[in-house]
Each structure stands twice: as structure tokens, then as C-alpha cells.
Image (cartoon, helix red, strand yellow):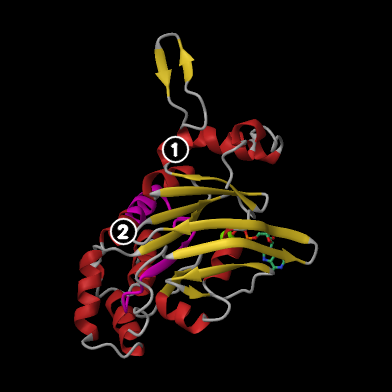
């Protein structure tokens, strides 16, 4: 690939001061974050918080009103072609062909990308994502978790350094979610950088090296799970210390059902970035 030379240093994703409005609705009001190479970063937020809007901007599908973003060292506004060469995007809806088998889907994409030996590429990915037994079956017979895993496998064809996973487990049953989590962990083991969006706290907790909470158009907190938990003092019950969960942190910042959204203002003082 030609997308390597000057891209060795710096974060895989750099986002600074992003703003985006849809008419009068201010969705992003100055979003900043960096994602280190080879890490999994979770953008956590409620429905409508603007997660997909961020993903669409950094994947060049949407123009920001203000601010800058770069992926793999390339500016999303001025070097969109290079950005697209560096990424793959797995959307909220799996993009696999139902009529083809899992293996045929993978071979098709490898052919479309003019890669050598599509069959071997397909077989390796089937193996990596535990789909070998189902390889010859039509995708229409797959479970939701299998489909999503196939979707992630397809997005890895051509080895993009950065992958965007927009709510990868939405609508899956618990077993399917666990299968997809394993697939995402598998990505990180291979050095791929992943930006994951989710509204599920346990998903962020399970998968992410760093978690950023997007709320009211801004990143309210950004840190490792341990750092986020330290934002709240441990609650003491007699002699038993209870560590705050990510859920406690999230609710303190975002509020319960949005009804008391200012509940966490004192907590986030000095922590937003
Ligand atoms: N094309 C659009 N036109 C108008 N409003 C939009 C459009 N896309 C998203 N929105 C609104 O922007 C807000 C953020 O949307 P989105 O980024 O999809 O949130 P999330 O992915 O966190 O659920 C929502 O209120 C949504 O209704
Ligand atoms: Mg979304």
C-alpha cells in the first residue's frame, strides 16, 4: 500500500474541535480525542448522542462544520482518498450478501480488491473468526452473531490499519454479543486500531483500552476504565469497599434517563478534555 511512508508516528486517529449541526440541532460542539495505534477506543453515548455522526466524519462520509480530524496521518477533509485506503467501516447494519455462503462473500470481496489468492484469504479469515464449519452455508442461515462476525471478517480484507465499528452488537442476543466481542478482541491482537461506538456500558468495559463518554455534543470524560472509576469515590458500606462501576460513572455524568443530566457536573469538573 502507498499509505505508509509518513504515517508511522502519531495517533491512528486524531480528532480536534469537531462541530456538526443539522439545521438548529447542535450535535457535536467541540469534540476532541486521540486513538493510539493498535488500541481499541470506545465512544460511549446514549441513543442520539452523536456517535454515528463522529464515525461518519472520520470515515469521510460527512463533512464537519468546524474542527479537524485525521486518520493514519491523513486529513479527512483534504486527503479523503488516503483516509479511505486506511480504513474500513462496519456499519450498524451488516452488509453481507444473504444468498452467498460465508466463504463466497469473503472471496467476492477479495476479488473485488484484486488481491492474490482470494481463497486462502477467505479460509484464513473463516478460521480466525470461527466460521470454518459454517463456511459453505448460505448467510441467510447464519445467526446474528455469525453474520456480524462475517461482516467484521469482510472488513479486514486488505488489512486496513484502522477499523470503525459502529454499534457492532446492537440487536444481538447475549450469545451473539459474546461472539462478536471475541472477534473484536481478536482484532486488537493483530495490531488493528479500532474505534468502537456503543451505548452498552458492559461492552465498553469488556473491550476498550480507553473509553470516552460523548454527551451533549462533547467528550465529558476520556480515560481507561480504571481512571474513569477513580472519578467517583468508592462507596463505603461498613467495612466492605465497593468500587464504582462504569455504570455509576456514566449515570453521574449523563444522568438517569437524561432527566437529571446535570447530576454529574461536580464530578466532571476538571476531568473534561
Ligand atoms: N441527516 C440528519 N439530519 C438531521 N438530523 C440528524 C441527521 N443525522 C443524525 N441526526 C440527529 O443527530 C443526532 C445524533 O445522531 P447520531 O450521530 O446518529 O447519534 P448516535 O449514533 O449516537 O445514536 C440525533 O438527534 C439524530 O436524530
Ligand atoms: Mg448511531
Residue drawn at (46%, 70%) of the image: 71
| Foreground: disc 1 or disc 2 | 1
Residue 169 lies in magenta, yes or no?
yes
* Outermost right residue: 24
* Front-lying residue, 55 or 258: 55
Tell me where residue 72 appears, x and y as whole percent. Answer: 42, 71
Q: Which residue is mark 2?
A: 188
Position of residue 250 relative to residue 235, above or below, is below
Q: Earlier in the sequence, mark 1 or mark 2?
A: 2
Residue drawn at (47%, 23%) of the image: 234
User: Answer yes or no: do the residues labelled 1 and 2 have beta carbons within 8 Å?
Assistant: no
Tell me where residue 14 appears, x and y as whole percent. Answer: 50, 63
Position of residue 85 relative to residue 144, above or below, is below
Alpha carbon separation for disc pair 1 and 2:
21 Å
Classify mark 2: helix, strand or loop: helix
Tell me where residue 117 appears, x and y as whole percent. Answer: 21, 87
Left or right of residue 215, residue 128 in this image: left
**Quarter of the rendering occupied by the N terminus:** bottom left
Residue range of the region highlighted in magenta in the rendering? 157-181
Mark 2, Cα crowd under 10 Å, few <14 / some 14-19 / many 20+, is: some
Q: Which residue is mark 1?
A: 227
Mark 2 CB within 8 Å of ligand 2: no
Tell me where residue 148 appears, x and y as whole percent. Answer: 39, 64
Amino acid at each position: 500500500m502507498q499509505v505508509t511512508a509518513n504515517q508511522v508516528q502519531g495517533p491512528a486517529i486524531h480528532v480536534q474541535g469537531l462541530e456538526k449541526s443539522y439545521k438548529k440541532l447542535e450535535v457535536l460542539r467541540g469534540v476532541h480525542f486521540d486513538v493510539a495505534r493498535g488500541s481499541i477506543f470506545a465512544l460511549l453515548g446514549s441513543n442520539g448522542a452523536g456517535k454515528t455522526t463522529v464515525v461518519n466524519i472520520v470515515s469521510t462520509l460527512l463533512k464537519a462544520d468546524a474542527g479537524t480530524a485525521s486518520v493514519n496521518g491523513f486529513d479527512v477533509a483534504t486527503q479523503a482518498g488516503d483516509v479511505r485506503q486506511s480504513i474500513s467501516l462496519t456499519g450498524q447494519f451488516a452488509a453481507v450478501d444473504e444468498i452467498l455462503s460465508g466463504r463466497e462473500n469473503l472471496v467476492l470481496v477479495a476479488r473485488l480488491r484484486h488481491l492474490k489468492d482470494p481463497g486462502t484469504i477467505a479460509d484464513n479469515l473463516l478460521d480466525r473468526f470461527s466460521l470454518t464449519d459454517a463456511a459453505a452455508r448460505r448467510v441467510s442461515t447464519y445467526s446474528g452473531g455469525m453474520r456480524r462476525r462475517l461482516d467484521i471478517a469482510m472488513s479486514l480484507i486488505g488489512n486496513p490499519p484502522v477499523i470503525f465499528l459502529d454499534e457492532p452488537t446492537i440487536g444481538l442476543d447475549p450469545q451473539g454479543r459474546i461472539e462478536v466481542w471475541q472477534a473484536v478482541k481478536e482484532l486488537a491482537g493483530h495490531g488493528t486500531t479500532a474505534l468502537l461506538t456503543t451505548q452498552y456500558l458492559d461492552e465498553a468495559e469488556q473491550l476498550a483500552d480507553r473509553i470516552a463518554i460523548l454527551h451533549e455534543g462533547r467528550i465529558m470524560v476520556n480515560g481507561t476504565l480504571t481512571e474513569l472509576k477513580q472519578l467517583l469515590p468508592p462507596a463505603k458500606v461498613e467495612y466492605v469497599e465497593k468500587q464504582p462501576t462504569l455504570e455509576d460513572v456514566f449515570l453521574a455524568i449523563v444522568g438517569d434517563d437524561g432527566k437529571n443530566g446535570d447530576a454529574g457536573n461536580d464530578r466532571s469538573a476538571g476531568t473534561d478534555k
